[in-house]
Image (spheres, helix red, strand yellow):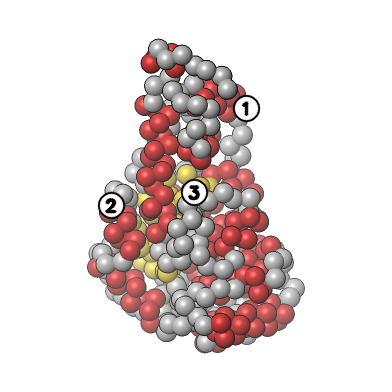
């Protein structure tokens, strides 16, 4: 996959002029102005639109849970998938509220659901291996997960894709990825996840540090992903890369989703042009991960649920950015005198 940077100086000037000539003081719509311009650059047009937004929620299990790094048992992964399918989770509520298609993907849950309405079965294994002792995935399995994610993104009709996840143990995987790809100390990458105590967080830190030492020679982004990641994280990474190649807007959720993007950005740096960061999670480490990517999140609501909830909540801001650019009067059309400050 090859991602084209969005830079287009002529279009950027057109968008700046269109935004600045609206009936408002310069810059007075704040982040919405930057968002409107970014959408225009992604879509390569002055006439932007938000069409058929979708959120992909990838679910998988992690062998690292055998090390006691979660406050919840692994069974919660498949139980939450059942909750998604029953329409009872927060992401169901918020996606419905904002008229967003929700697609739940079994990337590697340690449970056999059988054929189910609303479940996209792309199970590649019943979870990853325990990276405290061996790589979470083989190179070939990781490569397959990337390809499957890319194919899922290619199937979507709309021009906005949000990303969510579910997987007990995946904050541990994300923290390990963050450390390996940014160099930020493990202690600053590790957080409470599902609600660990201070003692539990310290134990999780020690588990990750020992695993990092064991796999010290792992360097390349895809190798790092295979060693420490999850099937849901790998599948998301592939979906992100393909969605950006197709010039879709990528809505990035919290800590785990951003770790998938971190891998993607190390593989294809131009992907960042296509990313809208929905929020800054309350999970320890997310703010520094965003800073490492040069990201400016739209919201800071203290969320740390995952599931793509931040993406669904950010959708109205994308619509607002598109609508003001398309519908708001200019000084000329409104016959209002423009005053330079």
Determine if residue 146 is in view.
Answer: no
Where residue 182 appears, as percent x and y from the top left, is: 69, 62
Q: Which residue is mark 1?
A: 9
**Cβ atoms under marks 2 and 3 closer than 8 Å:** no
Using the numbered discs, state the Cα–Cα distance from disc 1 to disc 3 in whole angstroms: 25 Å
Q: Earlier in the sequence, mark 1 or mark 2?
A: 1
Using the numbered discs, state the Cα–Cα distance from disc 2 to disc 3 in whole angstroms: 19 Å
Q: Which mark is residue 298?
A: 3
For mark 3, give the secondary structure: loop
Q: Is residue 222 left or right of residue 106?
A: right
What residue lies at 43% left-to-right and 19% top-to-bottom?
330
For mark 1, give the secondary structure: helix
Of badges 1 and 2, nearer the viewer stands 2
Where residue 331 appears, as percent x and y from the top left, is: 44, 17
What residue lies at 52% left-to-right and 83% top-to-bottom?
197
Q: Which residue is mark 2?
A: 97
Of badges 1 and 3, nearer the viewer stands 3
Determine if residue 194 is in view.
Answer: yes
The image quarter in which residue 187 lies: bottom right
For mark 2, give the secondary structure: helix
């Amino acid at each position: 996959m090859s991602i084209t940077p969005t830079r287009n100086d002529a279009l950027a000037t057109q968008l700046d002029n269109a935004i600045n000539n609206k009936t408002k003081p310069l810059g007075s719509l704040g982040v919405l102005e930057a968002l409107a311009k970014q959408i225009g650059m992604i879509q390569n047009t002055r006439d932007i639109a938000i069409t058929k937004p979708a959120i992909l929620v990838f679910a998988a299990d992690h062998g690292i849970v055998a090390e006691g790094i979660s406050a919840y048992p692994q069974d919660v992964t498949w139980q939450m998938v059942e909750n998604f399918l029953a329409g009872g989770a927060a992401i169901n509520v918020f996606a419905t509220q904002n008229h967003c298609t929700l697609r739940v993907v079994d990337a590697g849950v340690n449970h056999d659901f059988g054929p189910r309405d609303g479940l996209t079965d792309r199970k590649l294994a019943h979870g990853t291996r325990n990276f405290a002792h061996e790589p979470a995935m083989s190179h070939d399995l990781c490569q397959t997960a990337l390809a499957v994610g890319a194919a899922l993104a290619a199937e979507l009709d709309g021009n906005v894709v949000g990303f969510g996840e579910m997987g007990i143990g995946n904050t541990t995987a994300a923290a390990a990825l963050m450390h390996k790809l940014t160099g930020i100390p493990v202690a600053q990458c590790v957080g409470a996840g599902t609600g660990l105590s201070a003692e539990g967080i310290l134990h999780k830190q020690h588990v990750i540090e020992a695993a990092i030492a064991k796999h010290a020679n792992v360097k390349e982004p895809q190798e790092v992903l295979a060693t420490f990641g999850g099937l849901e994280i790998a599948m998301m990474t592939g979906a992100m890369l393909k969605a950006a190649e197709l010039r879709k807007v990528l809505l990035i959720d919290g800590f785990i989703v951003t770790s998938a993007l971190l891998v993607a950005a190390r593989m294809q740096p131009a992907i960042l042009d296509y990313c809208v960061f929905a929020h800054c999670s309350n999970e320890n480490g997310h703010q520094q991960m965003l800073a490492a990517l040069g990201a400016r999140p739209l919201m800071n609501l203290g969320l740390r649920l995952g599931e793509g909830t931040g993406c669904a909540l950010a959708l109205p801001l994308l619509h607002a950015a598109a609508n003001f650019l398309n519908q708001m009067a200019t000084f000329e059309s409104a016959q209002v005198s423009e005053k330079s400050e």
